[in-house]
Structures are given as structure tokens and as C-alpha cells.
Image: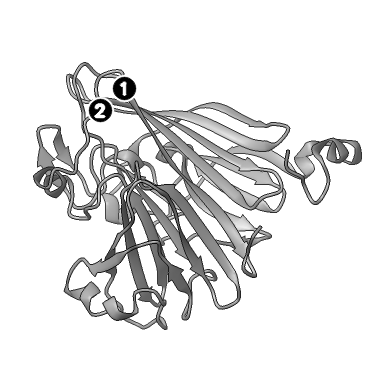
Amino acid sequence: MGDLYGSTIGEVRRRTGSLAQVASVEASVRTDGPDAGTRRLRLVAGELEVELLPDRGLDLGQVRHRGVPLAWVSPTGWPRPGAGGFGASFGGGLVTTCGLLSFGPPSIDAEGEHPQHGRYSGLTASVTRAEVSDDAVVVEATIVEATVLGAHLELRRRVRLPFGEGRIELRDEIVNRGSRPVEPMVLYHVNLGWPVVDAGSVLRSPAERVTARDAAAEAGLGSWAEFPEPAAHYPEQVFVHEVPAERRVAAEVMSRAGLGIRISFDTAVLPGMFQWRVAQEGAVVLGVEPATAPTILGRADARRRGLLRELAPGASWRLGLDIDVIRNGSVT
């Protein structure tokens, strides 16, 4: 059982008027701005504070450790789902989930029309559990992506912050509730920002090979591992990381000051990983993106290359991430 500030949960209870002094789940609703009316959950587990977004599939917004922000947040914020399309509503945050039927560029297939990075960010979650247990802060929710007479997928999400660790455990189970097989596609868009990301920050990748998506990325391929000095204009770059198969791997982003993030995942279920880099003033962001298919070109390319995996009616997949804070070379 983890500790809080070096004390067991029993010792904490004896020394506080309420456990909420050090660990809590706080619900709120935004009252103004572009995201007015949307729900927030603020999770506190000692030194770790996590913002959850129930109206965006229980994705992760800003995350702070010892008060230091870790995630990149875009100027759009998190308006209500479907407002203005992906480019006008991609708020960033520590984790934006892309899927459940497509990620990458827009596409059309037998499942219908898929917008950029899928519909997931426009889905609202039904929160089924939000509590402080004896060893962690835990929130669980159910998210459904379905169409009439079409695909019917249910995602069960669990976010857990174990005490005594700067760790976020994100666990998803996708269940096919429909009457025919479906081929899900999921990508976890992990968005890191300043001060973790700045000139000289380094990405340590488990990849066996790194390639460029296009000409803009080709120009930075020789320096993909080190974040450059921000410039007034810097075209986005996307790199494809070919990760080893069937094993637990981790990618780390480390700042010059020793603050970093470790993203751990299983390539048996997430065999793809991509890197998104923008070193533009006002948009300093590094994305690390584990995915269920090793293509960044969308559902059509995944089908053409035989990368889609069928999920039978009633069957389920389990996938997810661990995200750890690193300080001075050690996981907290």
C-alpha cells in the first residue's frame, strides 16, 4: 500500500481532519468561456493533481506534479464536443484518445465517414466510480461509440493514481456490443509541454528504427531525439517509431533540468508509436503516440496493409498506458 508524504494511509487519517487534505476527487462544471457547461473532475493524490474531462471521453487535461504543469494545452481549450471540428477543438492535455474506429486523417469506409482522429473526443462518459480508496484515487467510466444498425463499441475506462507514486495508470477495455465483427483503431495522443519540453529536451525511444512521415519531418529526421530551439515558424513534424513486437516498452522525455515523463505500454496490443513535434513559439509541444496499428495514414492505409484486427461480437480488448513522473533521473 502506497504512502502519502511518507506516511501510511492510517497515519494520515489520524493526523488530518479529512483525507481530502491530501487525496480527493472534486467534481465541477465550467460556467463560462468556450467550454461552458462541460464537466471536470479534479483528482488529487498527494503531490499529483490530474484533471479529467468526462465530456471528452474521460481524457486527461492538465496534470501537475508538485505544482509543475506537465501537459501541453492548446489555445482552443476544451469546447463542447463537435464544436468546429478537430482543429478548432483539439485542446491537447496529457492524453487525447483517438478512435475508436479510426485515427489519422479523415477517411470513409464500410463503417461510414471518419473525421480526423475519429469521434472519440466528441463522446461523453458516464462516470460509474469516483473515490479515494485505501491505496489510490480511482475514477471509472463507460463511453459508447455507436450508430444505428452499425458498429456498437463500449469502452470501459479506469484511471488510477496510486499513493506514494507520481504515476497515472490508464486502463481501457473495448467491448463489441454489436452483432457483427468490428475493427477498432485507437491511438493515445500524449501531449507534453513546457517545462518538460524545451530546447535540449530529449526523447528516449524504444524504437528499432525511426522514419519521417513527409518532407517536413524528413528535414528534422537527423535530430528527432532532441527538441530544437523554438522559432517563429516551425512546421509540425511527425516521425514513425518502429517498436519491438510483443513486449513491454517505455518512451521517456527528459528536460535539461532533470524533469521528465515515462510512458509505458505493451506492443502486443499497441504495436505502433508516433512522435509529433512542434517547436513554434506559442506552440511548443511534443507528442508521444502509442497506437493499435503502426500507420499514421489512417484507416484506409491500415486496411490496405492488413493492419486492422477484428473484434468479434461480445469479445473485448484490454489496452492502456502507465505514465510516470521522473525527477533527477528517478521515477517519483
Q: Is residue 189 above or below residue 175?
A: below
Secondary structure found at label 2: loop
Residue at the image point whose x is 60% and y is 34% from the top: 138
In this picture, residue 251 sits left or right of residue 217: right
Q: Is residue 315 visible?
A: yes
Q: Is residue 270 above or below residue 74?
A: above
Q: Position of residue 221 (x, y in %)?
A: 27, 76
Mark 1 residue type: Ala
Secondary structure found at label 1: loop
- Colour style of the rendered protein structure: one colour
Structural crowding at the residue carrying mark 1, measured as other residues with C-alpha within 10 Å and reported as few (<14), some (14–19) or many (≥20): few
Q: Is residue 196 above or below residue 144?
A: below
Mark 2 residue type: Leu
Residue at the image point whose x is 21% and y is 16% from the top: 179
- The residue identified by callout 1 is 315
Quarter of the figure that contains the C terminus = bottom right
Q: Is residue 245 above or below residue 157?
A: below
**Within the image, what quadrant is residue 15 found in?**
top right
Kindly indicate whether the residue at mark 2 contacts the one at mark 1 (C-beta within 8 angstroms): yes
Structural crowding at the residue carrying mark 2, measured as other residues with C-alpha within 10 Å and reported as few (<14), some (14–19) or many (≥20): some
Quarter of the figure that contains the N terminus = top right
In this picture, residue 159 sits left or right of residue 249: right
Q: Residue furthest right?
A: 14
Q: Is residue 30 visible?
A: no
Q: Position of residue 202 (x, y in %)?
A: 46, 73
Q: Position of residue 147 (x, y in %)?
A: 22, 25
Label for residue 311?
2
Residue at the image point whose x is 35% and y is 62% from the top: 207
Q: Position of residue 86 (x, y in %)?
A: 28, 51
> Viewer-proximal residue, 52 or 199?
199
Inter-mark Cα distance, 1 to 2: 6 Å
Residue at the image point whose x is 36% and y is 76% from the top: 280
